[in-house]
Image: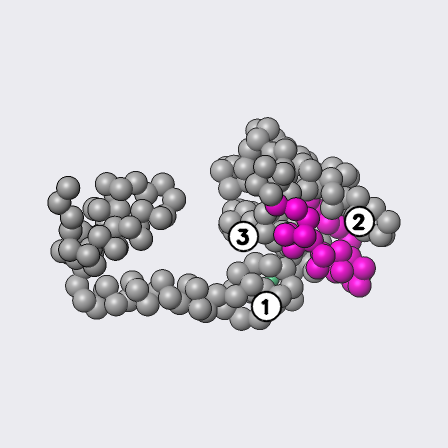
């Protein structure tokens, strides 16, 4: 089989590592960069790749991603800091935030308990949530993990951890289809899920 020159083969291999990118697309991307992108754009492109890894940090309060110590949501004093919405991923946070209705703050777990994937409670950002409940006077913890088996197990686990503290724990209603992931839900479904949350 005829191979491209090594730098191009390397780039094709890099693109192949991305989700949903097959060998053919990877080949198309790499050839596009070589034939169509000028040097300046190419430098910018590679600079952005490095910057994403070097300049983005985890917000030390909520687990969101940001360029500073705290994310813009945690820094925003106009939001209700006594209401915390717990999500599995940063992507879920963005999905809810972009609906533009929720005024509280967030807590990102960084996944969900999963026996099949070998993800346990120690792998998740749960301790800092419990710490927050212990040390701050909070009104409500809204569990917005996915409507999957993993999401339900995780929500139940957190609920049990928090049951002896004086904070209301609610679970968003799942008009989301069973097995449904937050980031695929449309705006209306998310709004309904938020409005219909119940004490858990
Ligand atoms: Zn934050």
Q: What SS does tag 1 mark?
A: loop
Residue for point 59% across, 51% down? 110
Q: Secondary structure at mark 2?
A: helix
Give the magenta range. Answer: 119-145
Residue 106 drawn above or below residue 194:
below
How did the renderer colour the structure?
A: one colour
Q: Nearer the viewer, residue 43 or 135?
A: 43
Image coordinates of residue 124 in percent, x first then y, are 64, 52
Q: In the rendered image, which residue does mark 3 sit on? A: 90
Q: Secondary structure at mark 3?
A: helix
> Is 11 a magenta residue?
no
Residue at point 13%, 45% (across, down):
2
Residue contact at pointers 2 and 1, CB within 8 angstroms = no
Q: Closer to the N terminus: mark 2 or mark 3? A: 3
| Residue lying at 15% horizontally and 41% vertically, measured from the top left | 1
The local crowd at label 3, few if under 14, some if 14 to 19, many if 20 or more residues have their Cα within 10 Å, is some
Residue 76 visible to an observer of this rendering: no
Mark drawn on residue 162: 2
Packing grade of label 1 (10 A; few <14, some 14-19, many >=20) is some
Mark 2 neighbour density, 10 Å: few (under 14) some (14–19) many (20 or more): some
């Amino acid at each position: 089989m005829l191979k491209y020159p090594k730098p191009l083969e390397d780039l094709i291999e890099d693109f192949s590592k991305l989700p949903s990118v097959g060998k053919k697309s990877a080949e198309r991307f790499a050839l596009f960069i070589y034939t169509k992108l000028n040097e300046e754009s190419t430098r910018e492109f590679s600079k952005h790749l490095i910057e994403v890894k070097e300049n983005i940090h985890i917000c030390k309060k909520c687990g969101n991603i940001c360029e500073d110590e705290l994310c813009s949501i945690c820094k925003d004093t106009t939001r209700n800091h006594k209401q915390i919405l717990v999500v599995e991923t940063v992507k879920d946070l963005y999905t809810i935030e972009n609906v533009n209705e929720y005024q509280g703050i967030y807590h990102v777990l960084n996944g969900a308990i999963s026996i099949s994937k070998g993800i346990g409670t120690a792998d998740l950002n749960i301790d800092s949530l419990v710490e927050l409940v212990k040390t701050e006077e909070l009104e409500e913890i809204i569990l917005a993990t996915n409507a999957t088996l993993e999401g339900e197990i995780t929500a139940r686990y957190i609920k049990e951890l928090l049951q002896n503290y004086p904070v209301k724990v609610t679970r968003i209603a799942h008009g989301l289809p069973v097995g449904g992931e937050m980031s695929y839900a449309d705006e209306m479904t998310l709004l309904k899920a938020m409005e219909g949350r119940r004490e858990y």
